[in-house]
């Protein structure tokens, strides 16, 4: 068995990866009862933030690549979470909207996200929470 480099526990890539795995895994468990993945939940939150976006606009908002979004959006249409509608002013453009199903679960799903955020930040003071969020935005 090879020896782990001494600096691995302090490696930022390692620490961020482990933090992501923990947060992502915990939230995934919360969403399982709704039949949603983390990325699908993110799409819904984006559409609740601004209904009627195009896929490209949604990708820009969520910092998501179009290839990933394409499959996610199709599955969400197929499972009844979102709807695609032609733009009344330009029939070549499809716009995305949360479905009636999504509207029924909106408050519960937003509460799940808030609960997940609270769990992640529970050991931080208010000042540390603000700083942590700022530092994550700086990395992005």
Image: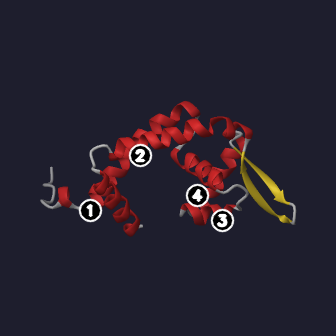
Residue drawn at point x = 67 percent, y = 45 percent: 76
Q: Circle 4 sits in a helix, a strand or a loop, which is it?
A: helix
In this figure, which residue is indicated by the disc labeled 4? 68
Above or below: residue 34 compared with residue 117 = above
Q: Circle 2 sits in a helix, a strand or a loop, which is it?
A: helix
Above or below: residue 129 compared with residue 27 = below
Count the numbered circles shown. Answer: 4
Per the model, the C-alpha gap separating discs 4 and 3 is 14 Å
Q: Is residue 117 left or right of residue 68?
A: left
Residue drawn at point x = 31 percent, y = 43 percent: 122
Above or below: residue 21 compared with residue 92 = above
Per the model, the C-alpha gap separating discs 2 and 3 is 25 Å
Position of the C terminus, as image quadrant, is: bottom left
Residue found at the far bottom of this picture? 138
Q: Which-is-in-front pick, marks 3 and 1? A: 3
Residue drawn at point x = 87 percent, y = 61 percent: 88
Is residue 31 visible to us here? yes
Q: Circle 1 sits in a helix, a strand or a loop, which is it?
A: helix
Looking at the image, is mark 2 or mark 4 earlier in the sequence?
Answer: 4
Query: Where's residue 15, x and y in %?
Result: 27, 56
Per the model, the C-alpha gap separating discs 3 and 1 is 31 Å
Q: Is residue 1 left or right of residue 34?
A: left
In this figure, which residue is indicated by the disc labeled 2? 117
Residue 81 in which image quadrant? top right
Query: Where's residue 61, x and y in %?
Result: 58, 63
Per the model, the C-alpha gap separating discs 1 and 4 is 26 Å
């Amino acid at each position: 068995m090879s020896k782990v480099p001494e600096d691995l526990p302090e490696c930022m890539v390692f620490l961020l990866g482990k933090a992501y795995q923990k947060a992502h895994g915990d939230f995934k468990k919360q969403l399982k009862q709704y039949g949603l993945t983390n990325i699908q939940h993110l799409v819904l939150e984006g559409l609740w933030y601004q209904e009627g976006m195009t896929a490209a606009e949604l990708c820009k908002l969520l910092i998501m690549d179009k290839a990933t979004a394409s499959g996610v959006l199709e599955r969400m249409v197929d499972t009844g979470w979102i709807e695609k509608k032609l733009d009344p002013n330009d029939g070549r453009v499809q716009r995305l909207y949360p479905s009636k199903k999504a509207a029924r679960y909106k408050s519960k799903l937003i509460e799940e996200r808030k609960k997940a955020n609270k769990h992640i930040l529970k050991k931080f003071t208010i000042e540390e929470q603000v700083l942590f969020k700022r530092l994550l935005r700086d990395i992005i």
